[in-house]
Amino acid sequence: MKGLFKKQDKQTKETKSKKLKVRKFGARKKSVIILWIVLIGSLAFGVYKNFTAIDRHTIHEREIIETKIMDTNAIESFTKNFVKDYYTWQNKKESIEQRTEKINDYLTEDLQALNTDTVRADIPTSSSVGDINIWSVSQENEDTYAVVYSVEQKITEDKNSEWIRSAYRVLLHQDNTGNLVITQNPTLWSLPNKSDYEPQQPESNGTVDSDTIQEVTEFLETFFAFYPTATDKELAYYVKNNALPPIGKDYLFSELVNPVFQQSGNQVYVWVSVKYLDETTKATQFLQYVLTLEKDTNWMIVK
């Protein structure tokens, strides 16, 4: 019986194995054809896009500010000539008439009429001009410029005279050909005052030892003693790269004043005032230097 059951089991397994179907995809099946079409189409589309794609670049906008150099020579010369004529007169009718004619060459017609009586025929004073200084020229718009100037006048009345100094501002128009005309009368103005700025003073920071300080001090005393009259060839023993030019002055060396020493690597930096007597004017001169020194065989000023 057991042998019979085994035989039947074997037959049953073989029957099941025979009933198991394996599906095969042939090259002519529709689904395979569709997949091939999709694949080929995708490749073709990719190649097409590669050749027809538009390059996209990130555009970085940069603002370029151009510095325009303004030539103010003509404006300054025109203003100085006007100032000289405007503030010069004698208490004589002929002189006053001449002044009026001269200043009309600078003024618009409206300003000519306005300035008719600025210096009256019976004025008791005379005026002559000393220094004229142009302090600023600024562009108000495309063709209008503001000029701030100062003028020294010697005012004489009878036998008395005094010097006065005043500052004014005028407006000028400049046309396309470069011609100028004053469009606003001299108006009292202010001048820059002394600034309270004080630069930070260097200090010795202990980076230079005492022996080096002594060596550098002796070198500088020797150098500055002959420097005023030294030639290019003589300077070459003490100076590199034309760090100091020949000056050709009759100065007598006196001393180094308050030298400050600092060191970085093989370079020594020195801030020093050099006291000289000017043999020509007999005045004392204090010349100030910021020097960089290096030592090879000897000390040299390199900057």
Image: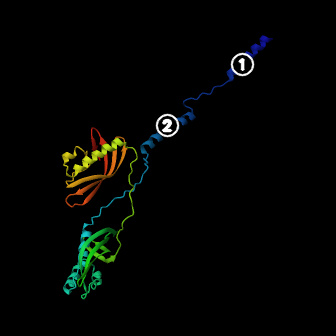
Nearer the observer, 14 or 106: 106
Q: Quadrant of the N terminus?
A: top right
Res 154 label: none
Q: Residues within 10 Å of mark 2 (few under 14, many from 20)?
A: few
Q: Residue furthest bottom?
A: 122
Nearer the observer, 268 or 224: 224
Kind of element beneath mark 2: helix
Q: What x and y, as percent, mark residue 45?
A: 47, 41
Task: Look at the picture and state if 205 lies above or below 285.
Answer: above
Q: What x and y, as percent, mark residue 93?
A: 20, 87
Q: Which residue is identified by label 1? A: 13
Kind of element beneath mark 1: helix
Q: Quadrant of residue 27?
A: top right
Q: Quadrant of residue 81?
A: bottom left
Nearer the observer, 154 or 78: 154
Q: Measuring 24% from the left and 60% from the top, which residue is drawn there?
A: 283
Q: What x and y, as percent, mark residue 130?
A: 24, 73
Q: Which residue type carries mark 2?
A: Ile
Q: Measuring 32% from the left and 44% from the top, which residue is drawn there?
A: 214
Q: Measuring 33% from the left and 48% from the top, which residue is drawn there?
A: 270
Q: What x and y, as percent, mark residue 69?
A: 30, 61
Task: Look at the picture and state if 295 lies above or below 253.
Answer: above
Compared across the picture, whether 207 is left or right of 75 comes to right
Q: Measuring 39% from the left and 59% from the top, which residue is drawn there?
A: 198
Would residue 104 be visible to someone looking at this image? no
Q: Residue furthest front?
A: 254
Q: Which residue type carries mark 1?
A: Lys
Res 40 label: 2
Q: Quadrant of residue 100?
A: bottom left
The reply to whether dot 2 and dot 1 touch (C-beta < 8 Å) is no
Compared across the picture, whether 92 is left or right of 39 comes to left
